[in-house]
Amino acid sequence: MKKTHIISIVIIAAAIVFLVSMLSNSSTYADFNEAARLGPDEDVHVAGQLVRTKPMEYNPQVDANRFVFYMTDRNNEERKVVLLKSKPQDFERTPQVVAIGSMKGNEFVAKDVLMKCPSKYNDGKDGMANK
């Protein structure tokens, strides 16, 4: 075999190993019931709406890496979410939230959250459209 063939085979094998490892580490979208069924060792993405009628808890003087809020999933099931990070800026304005983490008891413990940008959904009514 030529050196170019051997190098090509090694590169292809490395690419396959990389793709398989990326697929095995990716979490899936679920609702709170599915997350509870999978247990605390399986990270999932739970998409839903922020419950604005319940209080949010964030006290950076006590613990800057703990933010608590409530959200409903796609099945309208409401759960308490404990984010192990600081409160994201403009969190109250977001129309949708994706919490990434796992269920621990009756709480969803999130390692991260993704938010839809509220400025994309307010038709420019926040005064920024004229600038």
Image (cartoon, helix red, strand yellow):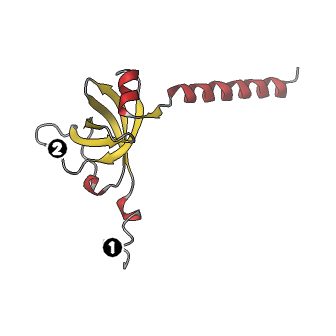
Image coords of residue 102 (percent x, y)? 35, 28
Compared to residue 104, the image places residue 63 above or below, namely: below
Compared to residue 108, the image places residue 131 above or below, namely: below
Image coords of residue 88 (percent x, y)? 28, 49
Secondary structure of the residue carrying tag 2 is strand
Image coords of residue 128 (percent x, y)? 34, 73
Q: Residues within 10 Å of mark 1 (few under 14, many from 20)?
A: few
Compared to residue 117, the image places residue 60 above or below, namely: above
The residue under label 1 is which amino acid type?
A: Lys
Which image quadrant: the C terminus? bottom left
Q: Nearer the viewer, residue 42 or 89?
A: 42
Q: Which residue is mark 2?
A: 58
Q: Which residue is mark 1?
A: 125
Secondary structure of the residue carrying tag 1 is loop
Q: Nearer the viewer, residue 52 or 6?
A: 52
Image coords of residue 32 (percent x, y)? 35, 32
Residue under the point 80% across and 23% down: 6
